[in-house]
Amino acid sequence: MPDPARIAGTVRRWISVATALACLIPCAAAAQDQPVVAAIEAAYLTKFPAFVEWPAGGPTALCVLAPEATGRLIEQAESKLPPDAGPAAVLRLPPSAPALGCGMLFVGERDVPLPPMAPATLVVTDQAADGHKGVINFVIRDDRVRFEIDDAEAARRGLIISSKLLSLAVSVKPRA
Amino acid sequence: MTGLMNRLTNFRRHLPKLALLAAAILLGLGLLIVLQSERTYRQERIGQLSVQAHILAATVTAALTFDDQAAGSEYVAALGADQSLRAAAVYRADGSLFASFVQPGATPVAPTLAPTSPTIENGRLIVTAPVTQNGVLLGTVYVRTLTEPVSMRLQRHGAIVLLAVMASLVAAVLGFGQAALTRANAGLEQHAAELAEVNRMLEQQIEERERVEETLRQAQKMEAVGQLTGGIAHDFNNLLQVILGNLDVMKSRLPADDNGFGLKLEAAQRAGERAAVLTAQLLAFARRQPLDPRPIEINRLVAGMSNLLHRTLGETIRIETKLARDLWWVSADGNQLENALLNLAVNARDAMPGTGTLTIETRNIRLDSDDPALSDRLQTAECVAITVSDTGTGMTREVIAKAFEPFFTTKDFGRGTGLGLSQVYGFVKQSGGHIEIVSAPGAGATIKILLPRIADPNGRSDVVAPAEQLPQGEEQELILLVEDDENVRMIGLEMLRALGYRVIEAADGHEALHHLAREPRIRLLFSDIGLPGGLSGRQLADQARRSRPDLPVLLTTGYAHQAITQAGGLARGIDLLAKPFTHAALAKKIRQVLEQHPI
């Protein structure tokens, strides 16, 4: 059984610890938070499919275009989910590899061009994906990992995002 | 119909119980409605709260998935708009609190909670709902509200309770009202029945009164007729006594060669005797015939009449006798009773032209206290009944009403005198008895005579056939003859002397007493009852027997006074000879009295 609560609890503890450390050593905060944020984003990534509808139906594969550590975190998070929950598989894409068979694409690496992909691909980006904006984009607000949603982009891609997920976004770009 | 009425009466009797049962059922129904309403209310509240919990569970899914407590708290706090909702919370799958909302003043939510079914405790309704996403349990929603206050619930159920109580009261009041009505009806019915009974008794009394008045009218009529006929008959008797006595004397002195005068005398005698019979019958009806009541056994008397009856009725009439064993004794004049039965038998024969059956039955009976026979002269409940029945033509009611009147007859002219039944009537009444006729046209007739019972006189009976020989007197036997009517006295004097007696005559009681005091050899006092001078024959007898208790007395009259013939009859030592008497009757009676009182 997936235990997102436990993961979240762990994440929260980590966040608390990290926040405390950030207060003591502000200069080292960004470097120290990176694994924690990556872990939270990994957990979130595996949970997004539950709130998204693809034109061809799910589940779908989650392709990862990110550093290897992040990819492992995502794989670990996916492995903790129940069999029917989360993405059908996690695929780490090599640079320049097409992402045509992916329902989801996570871009968590700087300076990488977006690979060719199917139109109905849920693109998720984070701050590292410099210059790229996906349908869902991770942001840090109040020292917490949050996300923005571009529902107009989702509509263009033929995706339907649950209002539940939309209600949690820090900002939503509505579809036309 | 009666069954239906009984069932209706039973139903009415059970109405109060049924009303109480109906009231109890109505109250029970009211209670059931209240309970059902309460259950429905709880289910509705649980349903409403469950809906709210499930809405929250659906809403909070993403917040719980992404552990967004701020978003979760917003969702939970939104429920606070419902003031009846006291607290709401979202717990994670591990039971830890994720987000919560508590109304001011309400009990805080627990930090951990396990999923549970809806419960109501301490006036609080708690509902939980699971939070799932794609079949995965993410947590639990907890919602708590207050149940409706008791006052509100009472207010809500008050109408029903009031209706049930009112309906029960109405049922009870109706039931008891019906019961009271039923009791009142029963009372009215009872009063009606009592009134009907009183009315029936009144009608019965009226009928009884009319019957008694009719009987009284009849009795008064018969009494009037009796007095009339009795008075005439008495005078006739004296005349007949003179006629018959002189005929007797003339006949005794008639020479052998009488040129046929003897036959003429005999014809005159027969006519006189027939006239005497008629006057006797009239006197009998008027209850003034001289009776000689003695204790008699009626069965012996009836048995002794067998030959006479067969001769009288002829061979075509069958005679049956049903004589009861151990029949009581009665006091009556046996000869008159024989005459009465013979009269009845002759009437029966005439009512049965051709063939028929005459039945004479005797039996002891005890009359009921309300028997109409007792209201008449008959005053003793224990009687001997002599019933003479025939199978003849019977009588109509009108004939029965007049049957006892003298000279009333239904027979052809010349066949009946109309004195037979009136003689029987007079004899029975004079004997202290009762007589009645039961008959209908074509159904024969039954004449019942009731005579009062007397004590058993130890077998003594005077129903003895008289001797046929004319006894003669002896010269030394001196008889004092007292008679105010000179003609009658003269004929009596001649008869007694012809029989061989010596005679002293007196015209009234005082003269007789004078003779008695002067002549102690007087052997017998033979006196008429009706004497002038203030001393009757009966008083004369009493005074004479005071000075000479052993003096035998023979009284004679054609008109027996009530004082003599009523119950008790004549005193011992005093005998009676009815006028007109024949020579032979006088001879026998004189001899009989003298022999009963030897010197």
Image (cartoon, coloured by chain):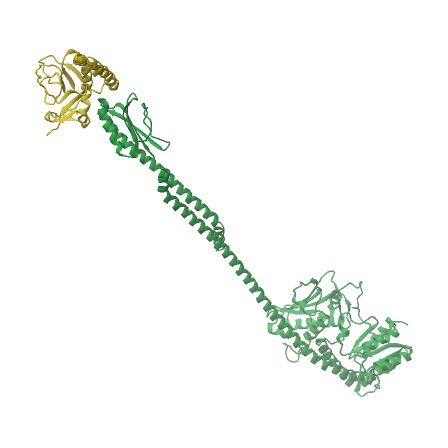
Residue B74 % position (x, y): 23, 28
- Point out residue B91 in the picture as x, y percentages from the top left corner: 28, 24
Q: Quadrant of the C terminus of chain B?
A: bottom right
What count of labels does the image hold?
0
> Chain B is which colour?
green
Left or right of residue B320, residue B498 in this image: right
**Horizontal and vertical percent position of residue A26:** 18, 14
Give the camera-side residue of A114 and B394: A114
Q: Vertical placement of B492 versus B335: above or below?
A: below
Residue B463 shown left or right of residue B401 in the figure: right
Q: Quadrant of residue B537?
A: bottom right
- Please state which of residues A2 and B458 is positioned toward the viewer in this rendering: A2
Task: Report whether residue B404 is seen.
Answer: no
Toward the bottom, the furthest residue is B259
- The image quarter in which residue B464 lies: bottom right
Question: x%, y% of residue A93?
Answer: 12, 13
Quadrant of residue B88 within the rendered picture = top left
Decide if residue B505 is on the left or right side of residue B146: right
Q: Residue furthest front?
A: A24
Name the foreground residue: A101 vs B548.
Answer: A101
Colour of chain A, in one word, is yellow
Let me know if residue A164 appears in the view. Answer: yes
